[in-house]
């Protein structure tokens, strides 16, 4: 593959939903040389007074990690046939957020890649992430170090590990 590799990958599992259900975006910064998680977290729509402030928090995240010069991997949004009726009358807030992230990265010259949820979740289930040492399981919860992490952060981790292992999708 002719993929210019950055040492760091910022993986984002976006939820642009503000008006349609107060979304939560998970993110993870992975060092591809050491295979260690450097930082992780989430951005919750409930913490912001309006949709634009919530979306801007994603740009602020990119700003805050710019010193790492990461490539950015974003979970793509696909409307699957079996879920299409659930999206009737939707404003498609998540695809709008993905567009904002892509455009902002384009303006800054940041390498940005999209990955489907299906390809990543099939390859990197939690059992594999535990065996590889990225997650710890205690009871029903999954942890990074001693921090209990949400499904959103786990999904961002999947995207980071997948990209670090295989590069961009064809």
Image (cartoon, grey):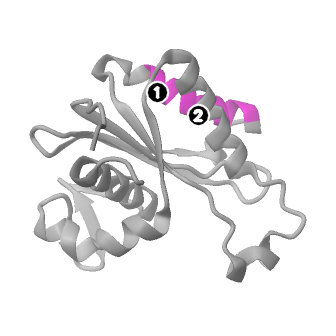
**Magenta segment:** 52-63
Identify the residue at horizontal 18%, vertical 58% (top origin).
Answer: 134
- The kind of secondary structure the magenta stretch mainly shows is helix
- The label shown at residue 101 is 2
Q: Indicate which label's residue lies in the foreground, 1 or 2.
A: 2
Horizontal and vertical percent position of residue 73: 42, 43
Is residue 156 found inside the magenta-colored segment of the image?
no
Q: In the figure, is residue 88 to the left or right of 45?
A: right
- Say which quadrant the N terminus sits in: top left
Identify the residue at horizontal 29%, vertical 23% (top origin).
Answer: 68
- First in sequence, mark 1 or 2: give its number: 1
Identify the residue at horizontal 74%, vertical 32% (top origin).
Answer: 52
Horizontal and vertical percent position of residue 118: 47, 70
Q: In the figure, is residue 19 to the left or right of 38?
A: right
Horizontal and vertical percent position of residue 34: 9, 40
Q: Secondary structure at mark 1?
A: helix
Quarter of the figure with residue 99: top right
Question: CB atoms at circles 1 and 2 under 8 Å apart?
Answer: yes
- The label shown at residue 84 is none
Of 146 and 109, nearer the camera is: 109
Up-down: is 147 above or below 126?
Answer: above
- According to the picture, the residue beneath numbered tag 1 turns out to be 62
Residue positioned most to the front: 2
Residue positioned most to the bottom: 82
Horizontal and vertical percent position of residue 23: 63, 54
Identify the residue at horizontal 55%, vertical 49% (top origin).
Answer: 14
Up-down: is 70 above or below 15?
Answer: above
């Amino acid at each position: 593959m002719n993929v210019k590799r950055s040492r760091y990958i910022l993986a984002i599992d976006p939820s642009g939903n503000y008006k349609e259900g107060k979304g939560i975006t998970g993110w993870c910064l992975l060092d591809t040389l050491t295979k260690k998680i450097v930082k992780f977290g989430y951005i919750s729509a409930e913490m912001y007074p309006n949709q634009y402030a919530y979306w801007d928090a994603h740009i602020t995240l990119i700003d805050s990690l710019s010193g790492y010069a990461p490539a950015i991997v974003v979970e793509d949004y696909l409307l699957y046939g079996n879920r299409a009726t659930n999206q009737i009358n939707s404003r498609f807030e998540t695809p709008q957020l993905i567009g904002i992230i892509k455009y902002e990265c384009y303006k800054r010259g940041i390498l940005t890649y999209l990955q489907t949820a299906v390809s990543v979740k099939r390859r990197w289930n939690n059992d594999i992430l535990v065996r590889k040492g990225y997650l710890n399981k205690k009871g029903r919860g999954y942890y990074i170090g001693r921090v209990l992490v949400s499904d959103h952060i786990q999904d961002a981790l999947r995207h980071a590990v997948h990209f670090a292992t295989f590069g961009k999708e064809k």
